[in-house]
Amino acid sequence: MTPERLRIVDAVLARRQPDLTVLLEQVYKPHNFSAIIRSCDAVGIPKVHAVAHHSGVPEYAHISSGAHKWVEVEAHKNISAAYKQLKAAGYQLVVTHLSAQAIDFRTLDYCQPTALVFGTEKTGVSSQALKMADAEVIVPMVGMTPSLNVSVACAVILYEVQRQRQQAGLYQQMRLPPEERDRLRFEWLHPILTDFCRRHQLSYPKLDANGDLLETIPH
Protein backbone atom coordinates (compact mmCIF):
# COMPACT_ATOMS: atom_id res chain seq x y z
CA MET A 1 0.00 0.00 0.00
CA THR A 2 1.66 3.21 -1.15
CA PRO A 3 0.90 6.49 0.61
CA GLU A 4 -0.08 8.02 -2.75
CA ARG A 5 -2.68 5.34 -3.51
CA LEU A 6 -4.11 5.65 -0.01
CA ARG A 7 -4.31 9.44 -0.37
CA ILE A 8 -6.13 9.22 -3.70
CA VAL A 9 -8.62 6.60 -2.51
CA ASP A 10 -9.48 8.51 0.66
CA ALA A 11 -9.79 11.80 -1.26
CA VAL A 12 -12.13 10.30 -3.86
CA LEU A 13 -14.32 8.63 -1.24
CA ALA A 14 -14.55 11.93 0.64
CA ARG A 15 -16.22 13.52 -2.41
CA ARG A 16 -18.64 10.74 -3.35
CA GLN A 17 -22.28 11.81 -3.68
CA PRO A 18 -24.49 8.95 -2.46
CA ASP A 19 -27.72 10.85 -3.24
CA LEU A 20 -26.88 11.38 -6.91
CA THR A 21 -27.28 8.70 -9.56
CA VAL A 22 -28.00 8.00 -13.21
CA LEU A 23 -30.64 5.55 -14.44
CA LEU A 24 -30.09 4.15 -17.93
CA GLU A 25 -33.13 2.70 -19.64
CA GLN A 26 -32.03 0.17 -22.26
CA VAL A 27 -28.86 1.99 -23.29
CA TYR A 28 -27.34 -0.81 -25.34
CA LYS A 29 -24.19 0.49 -27.05
CA PRO A 30 -21.06 -0.41 -25.04
CA HIS A 31 -19.19 2.79 -25.90
CA ASN A 32 -22.09 4.96 -24.72
CA PHE A 33 -22.60 2.91 -21.58
CA SER A 34 -18.89 3.05 -20.76
CA ALA A 35 -18.60 6.78 -21.46
CA ILE A 36 -21.51 7.44 -19.09
CA ILE A 37 -19.88 5.37 -16.36
CA ARG A 38 -16.69 7.39 -16.82
CA SER A 39 -18.59 10.68 -16.49
CA CYS A 40 -20.39 9.40 -13.38
CA ASP A 41 -17.09 8.55 -11.71
CA ALA A 42 -15.73 11.98 -12.64
CA VAL A 43 -18.49 13.80 -10.74
CA GLY A 44 -18.50 11.45 -7.73
CA ILE A 45 -21.43 9.12 -8.42
CA PRO A 46 -20.88 5.81 -6.59
CA LYS A 47 -23.66 3.78 -8.23
CA VAL A 48 -25.49 3.75 -11.57
CA HIS A 49 -28.82 2.02 -12.18
CA ALA A 50 -29.67 0.27 -15.44
CA VAL A 51 -32.71 -1.31 -17.01
CA ALA A 52 -31.21 -3.85 -19.37
CA HIS A 53 -31.85 -3.97 -23.09
CA HIS A 54 -33.08 -7.36 -24.36
CA SER A 55 -29.43 -8.15 -25.11
CA GLY A 56 -28.47 -7.41 -21.51
CA VAL A 57 -26.42 -4.71 -19.79
CA PRO A 58 -23.57 -3.78 -22.16
CA GLU A 59 -20.03 -4.91 -21.48
CA TYR A 60 -17.60 -2.11 -20.79
CA ALA A 61 -15.62 -0.64 -23.66
CA HIS A 62 -12.07 0.69 -23.32
CA ILE A 63 -13.49 4.22 -23.28
CA SER A 64 -14.42 3.78 -19.61
CA SER A 65 -10.69 4.00 -18.75
CA GLY A 66 -11.25 1.66 -15.83
CA ALA A 67 -14.06 3.76 -14.31
CA HIS A 68 -16.21 0.62 -14.00
CA LYS A 69 -13.92 -0.44 -11.14
CA TRP A 70 -15.07 2.54 -9.10
CA VAL A 71 -18.76 2.84 -10.06
CA GLU A 72 -21.19 0.06 -9.20
CA VAL A 73 -24.02 -0.83 -11.57
CA GLU A 74 -27.33 -2.13 -10.22
CA ALA A 75 -29.56 -3.82 -12.81
CA HIS A 76 -33.36 -3.67 -12.71
CA LYS A 77 -35.83 -5.90 -14.54
CA ASN A 78 -37.93 -2.95 -15.74
CA ILE A 79 -38.34 0.80 -15.42
CA SER A 80 -41.18 0.50 -12.89
CA ALA A 81 -39.01 -1.48 -10.47
CA ALA A 82 -36.16 1.00 -10.83
CA TYR A 83 -38.44 3.99 -10.29
CA LYS A 84 -40.12 2.39 -7.28
CA GLN A 85 -36.77 1.79 -5.58
CA LEU A 86 -35.43 5.27 -6.31
CA LYS A 87 -38.63 7.06 -5.32
CA ALA A 88 -38.73 5.11 -2.04
CA ALA A 89 -35.20 6.36 -1.37
CA GLY A 90 -36.33 9.96 -1.87
CA TYR A 91 -34.86 10.72 -5.30
CA GLN A 92 -36.37 13.17 -7.74
CA LEU A 93 -36.53 11.49 -11.15
CA VAL A 94 -35.38 13.81 -13.92
CA VAL A 95 -35.88 12.59 -17.49
CA THR A 96 -34.09 13.98 -20.52
CA HIS A 97 -36.72 14.34 -23.23
CA LEU A 98 -37.50 16.67 -26.11
CA SER A 99 -41.03 17.88 -25.41
CA ALA A 100 -43.11 21.03 -24.99
CA GLN A 101 -43.06 20.74 -21.19
CA ALA A 102 -39.32 20.05 -20.90
CA ILE A 103 -37.31 22.81 -19.20
CA ASP A 104 -33.72 23.94 -19.62
CA PHE A 105 -31.64 21.47 -17.59
CA ARG A 106 -29.79 24.36 -15.89
CA THR A 107 -32.95 25.66 -14.18
CA LEU A 108 -33.50 22.64 -11.95
CA ASP A 109 -32.20 22.19 -8.39
CA TYR A 110 -29.86 19.20 -8.26
CA CYS A 111 -28.74 19.61 -4.65
CA GLN A 112 -31.61 17.41 -3.53
CA PRO A 113 -31.41 13.64 -4.09
CA THR A 114 -31.53 13.24 -7.86
CA ALA A 115 -31.66 10.43 -10.40
CA LEU A 116 -31.04 11.49 -14.01
CA VAL A 117 -32.83 9.21 -16.46
CA PHE A 118 -31.55 8.59 -19.99
CA GLY A 119 -33.18 6.37 -22.58
CA THR A 120 -32.11 4.13 -25.41
CA GLU A 121 -30.10 5.57 -28.27
CA LYS A 122 -32.85 5.11 -30.87
CA THR A 123 -36.05 6.25 -29.18
CA GLY A 124 -35.08 7.84 -25.86
CA VAL A 125 -36.96 7.11 -22.66
CA SER A 126 -40.14 5.05 -22.70
CA SER A 127 -43.63 6.48 -22.25
CA GLN A 128 -43.77 4.77 -18.86
CA ALA A 129 -40.56 6.48 -17.76
CA LEU A 130 -42.03 9.83 -18.82
CA LYS A 131 -45.31 9.24 -17.06
CA MET A 132 -43.66 8.49 -13.72
CA ALA A 133 -40.98 11.21 -13.88
CA ASP A 134 -40.91 14.29 -11.67
CA ALA A 135 -39.43 16.58 -14.33
CA GLU A 136 -38.43 16.64 -18.00
CA VAL A 137 -35.34 18.54 -19.09
CA ILE A 138 -33.61 19.37 -22.35
CA VAL A 139 -30.17 20.56 -23.38
CA PRO A 140 -30.88 23.65 -25.54
CA MET A 141 -29.71 23.24 -29.14
CA VAL A 142 -29.19 25.95 -31.78
CA GLY A 143 -27.82 23.81 -34.61
CA MET A 144 -29.40 21.57 -37.19
CA THR A 145 -29.29 18.45 -35.03
CA PRO A 146 -32.08 18.22 -32.44
CA SER A 147 -30.15 16.42 -29.70
CA LEU A 148 -26.79 15.27 -28.38
CA ASN A 149 -25.44 11.76 -28.19
CA VAL A 150 -26.74 10.19 -24.97
CA SER A 151 -23.30 9.96 -23.36
CA VAL A 152 -22.51 13.58 -24.25
CA ALA A 153 -25.87 14.80 -22.94
CA CYS A 154 -25.25 12.91 -19.71
CA ALA A 155 -21.83 14.52 -19.26
CA VAL A 156 -23.15 18.02 -19.97
CA ILE A 157 -25.94 17.70 -17.41
CA LEU A 158 -23.73 16.05 -14.81
CA TYR A 159 -21.32 18.96 -14.85
CA GLU A 160 -24.17 21.37 -14.16
CA VAL A 161 -25.12 19.10 -11.26
CA GLN A 162 -21.52 19.17 -10.04
CA ARG A 163 -21.39 22.98 -10.32
CA GLN A 164 -24.51 23.39 -8.19
CA ARG A 165 -23.33 20.90 -5.58
CA GLN A 166 -19.89 22.46 -5.37
CA GLN A 167 -21.44 25.87 -4.74
CA ALA A 168 -23.60 24.32 -2.01
CA GLY A 169 -20.53 22.77 -0.35
CA LEU A 170 -21.64 19.19 -0.92
CA TYR A 171 -18.17 18.14 -2.08
CA GLN A 172 -16.50 19.57 1.01
CA GLN A 173 -17.85 17.00 3.46
CA MET A 174 -17.89 13.22 3.77
CA ARG A 175 -21.35 12.20 2.62
CA LEU A 176 -21.04 8.42 2.37
CA PRO A 177 -22.46 6.55 5.37
CA PRO A 178 -19.55 5.20 7.50
CA GLU A 179 -20.28 1.55 6.71
CA GLU A 180 -20.46 2.26 2.97
CA ARG A 181 -17.27 4.27 3.07
CA ASP A 182 -15.45 1.46 4.91
CA ARG A 183 -16.73 -1.16 2.46
CA LEU A 184 -15.60 0.76 -0.60
CA ARG A 185 -12.29 1.66 1.00
CA PHE A 186 -11.52 -2.00 1.60
CA GLU A 187 -12.58 -3.04 -1.91
CA TRP A 188 -10.55 -0.32 -3.60
CA LEU A 189 -7.42 -0.78 -1.49
CA HIS A 190 -7.47 -4.59 -1.40
CA PRO A 191 -9.09 -6.00 -4.57
CA ILE A 192 -7.46 -9.43 -4.22
CA LEU A 193 -8.61 -9.84 -0.62
CA THR A 194 -12.03 -8.56 -1.67
CA ASP A 195 -12.32 -11.35 -4.20
CA PHE A 196 -11.21 -13.91 -1.59
CA CYS A 197 -13.77 -12.69 0.94
CA ARG A 198 -16.56 -12.77 -1.64
CA ARG A 199 -15.73 -16.28 -2.82
CA HIS A 200 -15.66 -17.59 0.75
CA GLN A 201 -18.55 -15.43 1.97
CA LEU A 202 -16.43 -13.73 4.61
CA SER A 203 -16.94 -10.32 6.18
CA TYR A 204 -14.33 -7.73 5.32
CA PRO A 205 -11.76 -7.17 8.07
CA LYS A 206 -11.37 -3.68 9.45
CA LEU A 207 -8.59 -1.39 8.24
CA ASP A 208 -6.52 1.14 10.14
CA ALA A 209 -5.92 4.74 9.05
CA ASN A 210 -3.07 3.58 6.81
CA GLY A 211 -5.25 1.05 5.00
CA ASP A 212 -3.62 -1.96 6.67
CA LEU A 213 -5.55 -4.92 8.11
CA LEU A 214 -6.42 -4.72 11.80
CA GLU A 215 -7.32 -8.41 11.90
CA THR A 216 -6.42 -11.50 9.96
CA ILE A 217 -8.63 -13.24 7.40
CA PRO A 218 -9.28 -16.94 8.11
CA HIS A 219 -7.93 -19.31 5.46
Image (tube, rainbow, N blue to C red):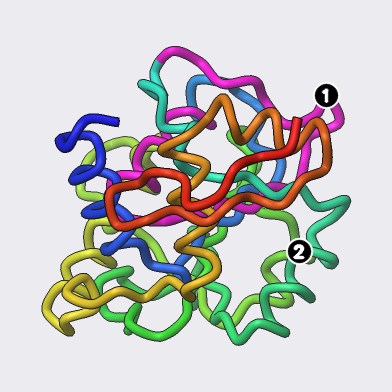
Residue flagged by tag 1: what amino acid is it?
Ser
Q: Viewed as shown, does residue 198 lie left or right of 123?
A: right
Residue identifier under label 2: 82
Tell me the number on the disc at residue 139: none
Q: Secondary structure at mark 2?
A: helix
The residue lying at 86 percent from left, 31 percent from top is: 54
Q: Choose top left, top right, bottom left or bottom right for residue 145.
A: top left
For mark 1, what is the residue?
55
Q: Is residue 149 shown in magenta? A: no
- Kind of residue indicated by mark 2: Ala
Task: Identify the mark nearer the N-term, 1 or 2.
Answer: 1
Q: Which residues are magenta?
A: 33-62
In front here: 4 or 80?
4
Residue lying at the far left of the rendered structure: 167
Q: Quadrant of residue 78 in the image? A: bottom right
User: Is 31 placed above or below 56 here?
Assistant: above
Left or right, 201 with reference to 123: right
Q: Residue at x 62, y 48 (%)?
A: 24
**Res 150 visible:** no
Residue appearing at x 56%, y 51% in the figure: 48
User: Taking 16 as reference, is 144 above or below it?
Assistant: above
Figure label count: 2
Instruction: Note whether residue 185 is visible.
Output: yes
